[in-house]
Image (spheres, rainbow, N blue to C red):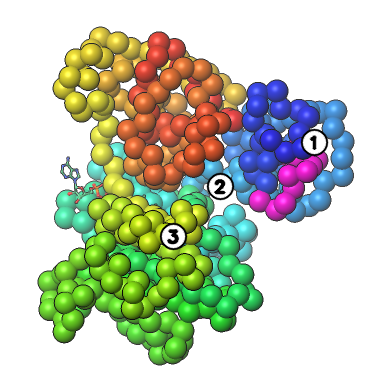
Amino acid sequence: MGAGCAWDTRGMCVGCAWDTRGMRAGCARILPAITQACRAFKPASRVILTANYVEPALSVPVPKEFISLCERTFIRMSKFFKLRIAETRKETEDCISVRFDVPEELSEIFEYKQGQYLTLRAEIRGEEVRRSYSLCSSPLDNEWRVAIKKLPGGVFSSWAHEHFKTGMEVEVMPPLGRFYCELDPHKDTSYVLFASGSGITPIMGTLKTILRQVPKARVKLFYGNKNVASIIFREELEDLKNKYLGRLSIHYILSRQDQESEWFNGRLDIDKLKHYAKIFFQPDEVEAYFICGPQPMLLALRQGLFDLGVEKSRVHVELFNSYVEHTAPRDPEEAKALEGKAARVDIKVDGKSTSFMLPYGGKTVLDGALAQGADLPYACKGGVCCTCKARLVEGEVQMEVNYGLEDDEIAMGYILTCQSHPRSEHLVVDFDQ
Ligand SMILES: Cc1cc2nc3c(=O)[nH]c(=O)nc-3n(C[C@H](O)[C@H](O)[C@H](O)COP(=O)(O)OP(=O)(O)OC[C@H]3O[C@@H](n4cnc5c(N)ncnc54)[C@H](O)[C@@H]3O)c2cc1C
Ligand code: FES
């Protein structure tokens, strides 16, 4: 909680939570900005309840940028906007990239950091489907481009490959995600990036941004694929290598096509990482590491970096999870112990409450509430994106996985509702906090 936070009686300082611009000392000053933002943006209903929390007696001059910060914070949370597809491009046999036209009036709301993602929504065979796709473009290019790899049997990716055409309108949520670090343009440093398959997408945006924004930075990319033909963005990567000669090095690791050195055959794993660390980079001299790809690779490389003494704060990971129907628990003995138990769940969103009963071993809190008709924010349903984050005001839950919440958020009582199952008789879950 920031010094001067006089209004919050529930232990949470909203002002500080939003504070990305060094306002810790004066979160009380941000409150009128929230009120003003609420008035201006009534359609974004999550704003309205928060206005009720605002101390009306406070009247402090509010700099415009805080209003803008508040507006963007709220609107970003769960609203979809219709964007026109400006271009679709075939990148490999099973991957297309899609560039969206973001009109001038939405450009601020759609501002992004390298490595963030967009969530797309469509109705497919009568059902609403949402999937997240990382931006492979750089914010410096004023371009919004995602790449979608077609998965065999994949609902959204197959549909997008079949239907996405120039001129078509798609429902898109503004950019989210934390797969980035702040860049210091004056720093003489290096970055190491690991990607596998479609995991190159956010890495591509990161790589392009670093090379342009930090002129003295060196970037090393280790990129795993099946064979040369399946390398997404191969041409663009080679062009970048030529353009940034001496600053960008790219090492391809192929699992189904032999290369001269054994160290570049097979999959990216912990042994390869340790070998590369001896030859290509000094682990403690690297500013930041970014890893994106399948979970086993991601966990192995992250552990490998920790083994080499790299601090947690310098390792950034992004996992691409797909939606799976969550029913917990999976262990039969645990399931038996929880049989017949159910919790009363009170959901608070937009100032309204919804109550329903939820079995301990059934749907997640999010799915249970959606089934009751609640309009709740979510995207990946895989414990990654944090769009479904809410505060557990009362009760206990068990989360299946958590790839998104930080330790301090958990300590403050936040949960990922898409992963949470009741473990006490009564839950109060507040989406407005
Ligand atoms: C933050 C984030 C960023 C992402 N960025 C990208 C990106 O840049 N590019 C990209 O291509 N993807 C990205 N993804 C992944 C993307 O969101 C989708 O998960 C992916 O496209 C698959 O969606 P789908 O609907 O096509 O497949 P789904 O229908 O969700 O299925 C996924 C896979 O599981 C299989 N499957 C489904 N149900 C079952 C079942 N019952 N039993 C066995 N197998 C089953 C399917 O056959 C398919 O292969 C990202 C995900 C996240 C969370
Ligand atoms: S919807 Fe993405 S973490 Fe829950």
Rounded to the nearest angstrom, the CA distance separating label 3 from label 2 is 33 Å
Horizontal side of residue 362 vs 376, given as left or right: left
User: Would residue 288 be visible to someone looking at this image?
Assistant: yes
**Marking on residue 76:** 2
Q: Which amino acid does label 1 sit on?
A: Gly
List x then y, in percent, for residue 410: 49, 34
Q: Residue at the spot x=62%, y=58% of the render?
A: 108
Q: Is residue 65 magenta?
A: no
User: Would residue 123 be visible to someone looking at this image?
Assistant: no
Residue situated in front as seen by the camera: 95 or 413? 413
The magenta segment? 20-34
Name the residue that disc number 1 marks.
4
Residue situated in front as seen by the camera: 83 or 343? 343
Horizontal side of residue 345 vs 60, given as left or right: left
Mark 1 lies within 8 Å of ligand 2 (Cβ measured): no
Q: How crowded is mark 2: few (under 14 residues within 10 Å), some or many (20 or more)?
A: some
Foreground disc of the pair 3, 2: 3
Q: Residues within 10 Å of mark 1 (few under 14, many from 20)?
A: few
Foreground disc of the pair 2, 1: 1
Rounded to the nearest angstrom, the CA distance separating label 2 from label 1 is 27 Å
Name the residue that disc number 3 marks.
310
Q: Residues within 10 Å of mark 3 (few under 14, many from 20)?
A: some
Mark 3 vs 1, N-terminal side: 1
Horizontal side of residue 193 vs 412, given as left or right: left
Horizontal side of residue 414 vs 128, given as left or right: right
Mark 2 vs 1, N-terminal side: 1
Q: Residue at the spot x=16%, y=77% of the render?
A: 262
Position of residue 359 relative to residue 195, above or below, is above
Position of residue 124 relative to residue 420, above or below, is below
